């Protein structure tokens, strides 16, 4: 018995191929490409002209405002701004002085008292007298100062005893830029105050 014609045609054809991973990858890549392309075109032809129009509008408003303010008022504004700048620089120089007191506070041991402090901010030099209760307190204070990395030079005057106190003088030079740097806490230094 011969096979029906329909079955013969089906056997003669190639089997249908099912799409594999390459077809899915191509479809995914094409979708991503068209999404990125549409976002780019939307930004390039929609959002950029909108931003340029907003910038032009703001520039126009600035020009109109500048024409509304008289030249005398503009001069007053410039003078006022200059005064604010001067005040800011004066306050910044006061912060430098506060940094000296902050450094002294952090680097003075328990039972040590500072007298006659002199500071030269331009070269970073300090000199002062120290009074301590015991000789061990004096030696501890000197040892503390010797281990500070920001001190370039350290000079200790003779230690002497006067009654119940030990006294000595300290002359030191800090790193030249110490007072001009922004204030930062020394996380490694711990005081025993």
Image (cartoon, helix red, strand yellow):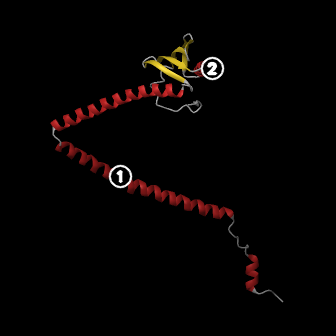
The residue positioned 69% from the left and 65% from the top of the image is 20
Which residue occupies the extreme front position in the image? 163
**Among the two numbered marks 2 and 1 on one chain, the one whose residue lies closer to the N terminus:** 1
- Location of the C terminus by quadrant is top right
Residue 53 appears left or right of 72: right
| Residue under numbered circle 2 | 136
Q: Quadrant of residue 18?
A: bottom right
| Residue under numbered circle 1 | 51
Tag on residue 76? none
How far from the left and from the top, in percent, is residue 76? 19, 35
The residue positioned 63% from the left and 61% from the top of the image is 25
Residue 14 appears left or right of 61: right
- Location of the N terminus by quadrant is bottom right
The residue positioned 48% from the left and 28% from the top of the image is 102
Q: Which of 179 and 85 lies nearest the eye of the viewer?
A: 179
How far from the left and from the top, in percent, is residue 90? 34, 28
Which residue occupies the extreme top position in the image? 158
Disc 2 crowd, CA 10 A, few/some/many (<14, 14-19, 20+): few
How far from the left and from the top, in percent, is residue 170? 52, 15
Q: Quadrant of residue 3?
A: bottom right
The secondary structure type at the circle numbered 1 is: helix
The secondary structure type at the circle numbered 2 is: helix
Q: Which of 176 and 39 lies nearest the eye of the viewer?
A: 176
């Amino acid at each position: 018995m011969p096979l029906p014609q329909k079955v013969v045609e089906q056997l003669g054809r190639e089997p249908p191929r099912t799409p594999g991973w390459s077809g899915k990858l191509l479809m995914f890549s094409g979708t991503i490409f068209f999404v990125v392309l549409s976002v780019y075109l939307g930004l390039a032809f929609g959002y950029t002209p909108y931003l340029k129009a907003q910038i032009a509008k703001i520039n126009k408003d600035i020009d109109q405002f500048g024409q509304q303010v008289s030249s005398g008022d503009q001069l007053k504004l410039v003078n006022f701004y200059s005064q604010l700048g001067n005040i800011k620089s004066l306050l910044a120089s006061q912060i430098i002085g506060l940094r000296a007191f902050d450094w002294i506070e952090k680097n003075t041991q328990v039972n040590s008292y500072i007298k006659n402090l002199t500071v030269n901010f331009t070269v970073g030099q300090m000199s002062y007298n120290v009074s301590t209760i015991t000789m061990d307190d004096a030696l501890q204070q000197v040892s503390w100062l010797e281990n500070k990395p920001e001190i370039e030079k350290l000079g200790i005057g003779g230690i002497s005893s006067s009654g119940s106190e030990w006294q000595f003088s300290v002359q030191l030079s800090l790193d030249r830029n110490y007072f001009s740097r922004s204030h930062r806490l020394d996380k490694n230094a711990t005081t025993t105050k």
